[in-house]
Image (cartoon, rainbow, N blue to C red):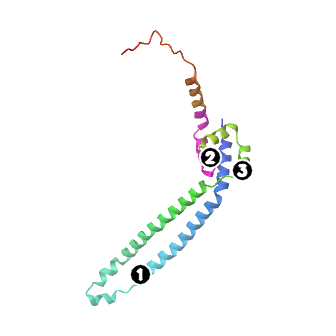
Amino acid sequence: MPTIKDRVHVHKAVLRLTALYKVIAISVCAVVALVWYGLVQRTLTFGAELDYSGLEALGLDGALIKQYNPFFWWTVIGICSLLVFYLLFHFVQYTRQRASQKVVSADQLESLLQQLSPSAIHVLGWCWENRRFPITVGVLQHTQQQLAANRYSLICLAKDQEQQLLKPRPSAPSKAEALHHL
């Protein structure tokens, strides 16, 4: 039966293998947040300093424009913020996807396997669906989820049920069964 230590070992391996991607994503988000904060401040300052006195020659009411000026600039900032956050979200998703596609080296896998119990190794083998490709961080993440979901007991149950189905059964109908004829 897999233990909590198995889950911890797989979790630590995943953290080690994805650390660079997480640092890059956090750094980019922090830099973008700082730059965006500066741009927001500059935009609001620019909007507050606009002089609408020249529009009176066109017959437009300057007081009305000044009254709605902050709302206009906050709307512009809100729309641009949604765009920036959308792009950041997809960047973070992209880095997570790249991290999950990272191939686990033979040395890294061997050091992990030495720490895992045989049942946890069995779950890792179950999670590694496509044997034509090497084990990736995504397989380890899936293993971590399946260890938490008690997958090993379900694998054992499925094997027991398979054995029950493969037992030879009498092929002749019993007296209790009604024979059906056309």
Compared to 36, does 151 lie above or below? above
Disc 1 residue type? Ala
**Relative to 117, 76 lies left or right:** left
Q: Earlier in the sequence, mark 2 or mark 1?
A: 1
Label 2 and label 3: CA atoms lie apart by 15 Å
Q: Which residues are magenta?
A: 130-155
**Relative to 94, 83 lies left or right:** left
Disc 2 residue type? Arg
Compared to 36, does 55 lie above or below? below
Give the numbered dot on residue 132: 2
Residue situated in front as seen by the camera: 163 or 78: 163
Q: Residues within 10 Å of mark 3 (few under 14, many from 20)?
A: few
Residue at the spot of label 1 = 48
Q: Position of residue 29 (x, y in %)?
A: 55, 66
Task: Classify residue 77 by image quadrant.
Answer: bottom left
Q: Position of residue 108 (x, y in %)?
A: 71, 51
Identify the residue at horizontal 39%, vertical 84% (top origin).
Answer: 50
Disc 3 residue type? Ala
Q: Position of residue 177 (x, y in %)?
A: 44, 13
Q: Name the chief secondary structure element in magenta.
A: helix
Residue at the spot of label 3 = 106
Residue situated in front as seen by the camera: 76 or 147: 147
